[in-house]
Image: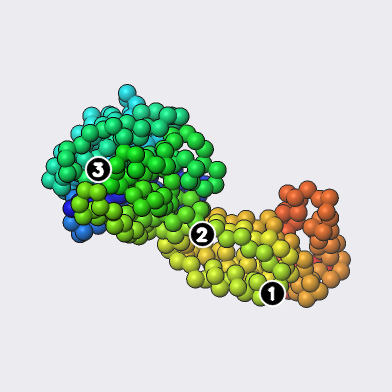
Amino acid sequence: MIRFLHTADWQIGTQFGQFEPDEAAHLAQARLDTVRRIAEAAAARKVDAVLVAGDVFDLQTVSDTVIRRLFGAMQGFSGAWIMLPGNHDAALVESVWTRAQRLNCVTPNVRLALTPGVLLLDACQAAVLCAPLTQRITYDDTTAFFDTAESPPGYHRIGLAHGSVSGILQEGIDSSNPIAPTRAATARLDYLALGDWHGHLRVDERTWYAGTHEQDRFRGNDPGFTLDVTISEAGALPVVEPVRIGEYQWHRWEETISVPTDVDALRQRLAALGDRDVLRLAVGGTTALAEAEAIHVAVEEARARVRALRVDLSGLQVLPTADDLAGLGAQSGYLAKVVARLRGLQEDPQADPQQVRRAAEALLLLARFQRDMPREARSV
């Protein structure tokens, strides 16, 4: 019997440029922290090995400090690690892997699969057929040699590769780094451990993507797992248990405001978020000024609670009611004309979308200024 953890796409060194610097720093650190949790899980579950199916690093140019931190995060598991280069960290002549070796980061229990071939784990009678990427993009199936690769009699045959299973992956994945969908069968594999797709995915009973260990994008494809795989004997079907290991949950919300109850519902959803959530929020529709202000306050309160937040309110049309105007003291005079002009921009179908967005922002700013001002000083 063999039992191992299958993980992939750690992308250590990801920059997260879409976020504020402090948010990005926490998200980058989480990727290292989750590697530590993988090591702890491997030790607790007493697995024979951890197989990492490519894209361990996000860039070849990560710093020496990042390399050292990554291998330091793995020290919680003293068993065998097999690490495969993917498209982001391909096994070039000079690569992040050769730098790691020069830095003496690679401990004896860590085996780097820098060339195609078979690595033997004699203690658990396993032959790991490794297909590293030696360049970022290839149009040949790097796993083709699995079909003829030899392994000792009675050993488990486990494939380790990084790429796209042809005709399987969603959302227009292209054909670079292709892998035949029948590879597990033609190569007589007990299990094919894959990386590249960032969510955990069963291709067939012997072929799985582990997905990224820590969610890194706004896509609902079940990231944040490692796979605990047990094979009772050579030729037996694997038993695969997805184990949630990631720290953060990423959400992408697109909300349309039509009636006041929509605002209440959005505020309640925002209030339920906490420090393990990352949110991208886009709000559209039409609302009165008071409700628009309530959305703004709820968003800013959520920003203080969640790990990271990106917000787009450009699609929200703000139309002050008579009560809104009375509260602003904008029922007549110059201020009323300014409000009317801003409303006109929002209602004009020929207006530049950027002008429409700025008009809504201006109304909200105007409301804040007026409400902060003593009543006797408000314009009339």
> Crowding at label 3, few (<14), some or many (≥20) Cα neighbours within 10 Å?
many
Q: Which of marks 2 and 3 is nearer the N terminus?
A: 3
Numbered-mark total: 3
Under mark 1, the amino acid is: Pro
> In what element is the residue under mark 1?
helix
Q: Mark 1 points at which residue?
A: 260
Alpha-carbon distance for marks 2 and 3?
Answer: 38 Å
Please give the label number shown on residue 251. Answer: 2
Q: Earlier in the sequence, mark 1 or mark 2?
A: 2
Q: Which residue is drawn at 52% across and 65% down?
A: 302
- In the image, residue 313 sits, relative to residue 177, either above or below, namely below
Q: Earlier in the sequence, mark 1 or mark 3?
A: 3
Q: Which residue is drawn at 73% across and 59% down?
A: 360
> Crowding at label 2, few (<14), some or many (≥20) Cα neighbours within 10 Å?
some
Q: Nearer the viewer, mark 1 or mark 3?
A: 3
Question: x, y (%) of residue 199?
Answer: 43, 52
Whether residue 182 is visible, yes or no, is yes
Under mark 3, the amino acid is: Arg
Under mark 2, the amino acid is: His
> In what element is the residue under mark 2?
strand
- In the image, residue 115 sits, relative to residue 300, either above or below, namely above
Q: Name the residue under label 3.
A: 157
